[in-house]
Amino acid sequence: MPKGKQIVRSVGVLALGLLVGLLLWGSWQSFSPAILVLLGVGLLSAAIFAAWWFWRARQRLADRVDRLIDAAERISRGEFTQPLSAERSKRLGLLESAFEHMRLALHDTTYRRDYLHSVLNSMSDSVFVAAPDGRIRIVNDAAKRLTGHSVEELTGMPVAALLAETTAGGVGTGVGKGAGTGAGTGLATDAGSDPLQRARELGETVLRTRAGQTIPVSFVVSSVATADAQFAGDIYVARDITERKRAERRIRYLARYDALTKIPNRMQFQHLLQQAIARAGRSGQGVAMLYVDMDRFKEVNDTFGHASGDRVLEVLTERLTHVLSSEAVLGRLAGDEFALFVDGVSADAEEAGEQVTQLARTVLDTAGAAFHINQQEVFLTVSIGVAFCPRDADNVIDLIRNADAAMYYSKQNGGNTYAFYSQEMNAAAVERLMLKSKLRRAVERDEFVVHYQPKVNLRDGRIVGAEALLRWRLPGHGDIPPSQFIPLAEENNLINVIGEWVLERVCLDLNLLRRSVTDPGRIALNLSLKQLRQASFILNCRAVFERHNVPPQSLELEITETTLMADPRRTVQMLDQLAAMGLHLSIDDFGTGYSSLSALQQFPIGTLKIDQSFVHDLAEDPADATLVRTIIDMGHGLGLEVVAEGVESFLQAQPLREWGCDLAQGRLFGGAVGIQEFLALLVNQQNGVPPFAALLSTGTGRSRRA
């Protein structure tokens, strides 16, 4: 039976008993029955109301207690969002209010705990929270991913158990997952010390994953600052530094080895050479060093592009590595410059010379084999300089410098050869350095002069123009030929400044000629690749022509085959613009590059100049004669004017005239002269007979061209 009904029944029985007792008492006191009945009914009603009120109060109390029980159960489940209502005037309300404060406090604590867990799990670094004994209490998600262990496996595990043993007693440099520990970093540590303490000191260590893989990590340890002993311990933060270690190894490699050819770079080569010199000093033997530089390698880059040039360097390195003995050390010093040395060379100069001569010839033969570039067969050569230690130098710097001087001597002698160092070569190297230094001030000091070499019509001997040739008059040294200072100007990036000066000077001279003679002809200037690559070259040319009031038709730009083929698409666009201005364009030194006449048809070229190397022996060499005649015929077939360079004798001029060559220039018609002398030639020609008509008429042959 419900407790509420028991209470009502008990109250009813009690009220009935009171009523019976009241009736007995009333009869004894002689009250009327009606009064007694009314008193009994009232007493019974009061008793029933009291019983109902008591039951209702108890029911409300039970409901509130039930609510408190439900709230306590929700709190125990971590549900803190639903608030509790409290009646502050009641003691039970105070209990409810206390429960509400507890709920709010637990809600705030739980929020902070969850937020902290979210922050930890969002970190890319691995976090391990450990007790004072080193056993793990808490980890984040990154720690699970890094180690491959689950939370259950990590909880209670000693942090030291995650550290891998290293063979060098230092921090491994393994490249990452599955790579093993790798080589040590070389940090000096006590291999027998506590690995966890060692990791603290170094700030780095190697972790071993659940799968047995090793990962290098940075390792930071902090103590938990708390007065409560139960929360004391340490926080370990580990970060995967596999990529950093890989980058460090790459940097160390690149600091010693050339990235393209995979052989020692200058620094490493010098280090190895220093060791060889030290060994030679102890053994009483010698060291032979060969400085190797590729001839005309710049033309390969300019013609086929730097990617093809890099491939040539790779192939050359592979060839040399294959043919050299294991005792030889090969290195790349810079660009297309290589060096190799062999220690254990005989101390006897003659015997050492024979040994190195054979080595130098091997290098020459290896480099001289054909290179295949863009499906074309190209032949390249090298120049070699040889120096010995201790005969020529007893230290690394001097030995390399002397071998370099010998190499430059080989290059000056045409390349594709070798030379042994002598003291005179150093003087030449110093002279070259001096010229490079003084070249920077040559324009400012007005040390350049322009001479003009006449171009002669082979039909009638008339001067139809000239080629402007630059000379450097260096005080105290005389005239420096272009073959010496033009390469230096290109190395120093002065060629553009010098080119602009030449254009200005030629325009000034042209105005002088036009004022004095009716038809001075065209003046040709040589154009370098660096000038053509200038973004403002065309604008600069137009500005110079306008400033001096010189018609572009009076000028001719001579461009080598190499320059034309360096970047054909861009070059043809620039040449089209130059031709549209009225400039005449010609190909200089034809036959020395990699192009063909058919390939040149895309360019707006009007003149073809045969290189003097083919003209020089055409009177004695049938092969050269056939080649020159073929070039003339093909040039005319393409509608080009043909000019022969380097004509020095009538024996050369006569066949050229017979084969229909249009123009010629060379010492047969006089060397390059100053502007006043050239003007005098033009004035005499205008006032009389062409200056070279008699010279050409001395032969019996006649031109085949009308």
Image (tube, rainbow, N blue to C red):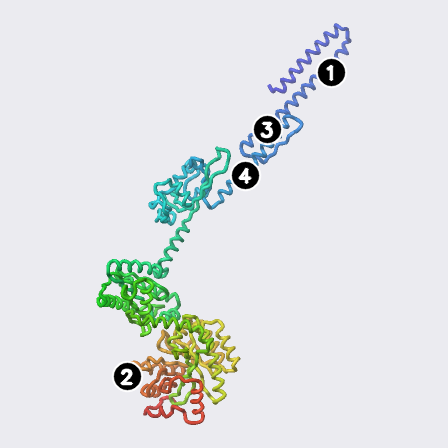
Question: Which of the two residues, 638 or 250, is positioned nearer the viewer here?
Answer: 250
Q: Which mark is residue 620?
A: 2
The image position of residue 245, as x and y in percent, is 40, 51
Front of the two marks 3 and 4: 4
Q: Which mark is residue 68?
A: 3
- Label 2, label 1: how many angstroms apart (C-alpha)? 160 Å
Q: Is residue 139 left or right of residue 167?
A: right
Front of the two marks 2 and 1: 2
Q: Earlier in the sequence, mark 2 or mark 4?
A: 4
Which quadrant of the structure image shows residue 312? bottom left
Q: Earlier in the sequence, mark 2 or mark 3?
A: 3
Q: Earlier in the sequence, mark 3 or mark 4?
A: 3
Q: Which residue is mark 4?
A: 112
Question: Which of the two residues, 395 or 246, is positioned nearer the viewer here?
Answer: 395
Secondary structure at numbered mark 2: loop
Above/below status of 578 relative to 12? below
Q: Which residue is mark 1?
A: 42
